[in-house]
Amino acid sequence: MEGINRLEELVSNLKQYAENWYDIRLLKIQDRLSDVLSSIASAIVIGIISLFIIFFISVGAAWWIGQAFNNPSMGFFCLAGFYFLLAVVIILFRDKWIKLPVINALLKKININEEG
């Protein structure tokens, strides 16, 4: 009789262990997901603010260059040429400068190699 009680207790403990393990896994996944999503959200906010800053600096620089050439439209064309060259360079090196760092940052946030 005592053997059956111990077996039932063992089965009960194993069930509780499995439930606890599942709950811990679920909490870890939720923690990682919330960390990644909060990082993405903050990157989006910083990106939008940066775009506004770059826009206003660009308009000011274009206006200043146009005043230097006594032709306001020339300043905007010069700045457009600069941004075109910058876009070409970014497109050429997008894997090295954008894709790989983003993938590495996300994998680091997720910590994909963690065991346990």
Image (cartoon, rainbow, N blue to C red):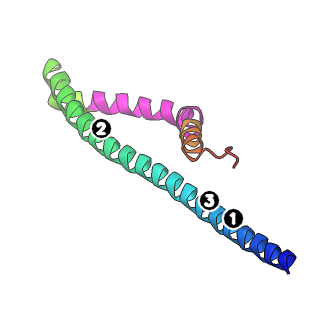
Numbered mark located on residue 103 in the image: none
- Residue 2 position, x and y percent, is 84, 76
Where residue 85 sits, quadrant-wise, is top left
Query: Dot 1, how many residues are within 10 Å of its Cα: few (below 14), some (14-19), or many (20+)?
Result: few
| Secondary element type, mark 3 | helix
Front one among 13 and 69: 13
* Mark closer to the observer (1, 2): 1
**Image vertical order of residue 53 relative to residue 48, above or below:** above
Q: Are marks 2 and 3 in contact (CB under 8 Å)?
A: no
Q: Is residue 12 left or right of residue 72?
A: right
| Secondary element type, mark 2 | helix
Residue found at x 59% / y 37%: 100
Q: For mark 1, what is the residue?
A: 17
Q: For mark 3, what is the residue?
A: 25
**Tag 3 or tag 1, which sits nearer the N-term?**
1
**Image vertical order of residue 17 relative to residue 87, above or below:** below
* Mark closer to the observer (2, 3): 3
